[in-house]
Image (cartoon, rainbow, N blue to C red):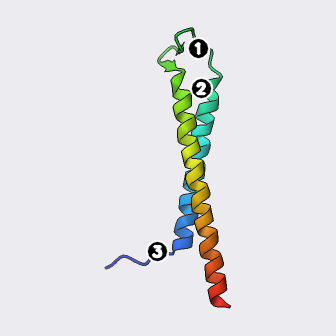
């Protein structure tokens, strides 16, 4: 048994959807953490955990990087589809 050839556009679509979902997850984490009432030291005390204000910036950075990657992969997918269409004519 060998590996089957992966259909590249379908693989890219799956990766784009996964990246978009991760981007939305980290964006929602950024929003939730930004709304917490932090003290003067940048900490929010919960009953079980201490949240730091700097985490919101890290989540925003991760979300932005995932958004950029999603956009690049979408451009690659569109170019591949256009190339296949022009090749078939």
- Quarter placement of the N terminus: bottom left
Where residue 3 sits in the image (x, y, percent)? 36, 76
Residue 10 in which image quadrant: bottom right
Look at mark 3 in the image and give the residue it sits on.
6
Q: What element carries label 1?
A: loop
Q: Tell me which residue sits at (51%, 73%) in the image.
A: 8
- Ranked by sequence position, the earlier of labels 2 and 3 is 3
Examine the rendering and report whether any part of residue 69 can be seen.
Answer: yes
User: Which marked residue is nearer to the observer: mark 1 or mark 3?
Assistant: 1
Q: Where is residue 72 in the image (x, y as percent from the top left)?
A: 58, 59
Q: Which residue lies furthest to the top in this view?
A: 40
Rate crowding at label 3 as few (under 14), some (14 to 19) or many (20 or more) other CA atoms within 10 Å.
few
Residue tagged by mark 1? 38
State yes or no: discs 2 and 3 in contact (Cβ < 8 Å): no
Mark 2 nearby-residue class (10 Å; few <14, some 14–19, many ≥20): many
Residue 67 numbered mark, or none: none
- Label 3: state its secondary structure: loop
């Amino acid at each position: 048994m060998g590996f089957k050839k992966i259909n590249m556009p379908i693989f890219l679509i799956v990766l784009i959807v996964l990246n978009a979902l991760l981007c939305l997850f980290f964006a929602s984490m950024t929003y939730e953490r930004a709304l917490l009432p932090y003290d003067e030291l940048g900490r929010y005390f919960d009953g079980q955990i201490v949240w730091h204000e700097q985490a919101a910036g890290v989540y925003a950075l991760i979300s932005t990087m995932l958004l950029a990657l999603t956009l690049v992969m979408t451009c690659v997918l569109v170019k591949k589809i256009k190339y296949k269409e022009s090749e078939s004519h």
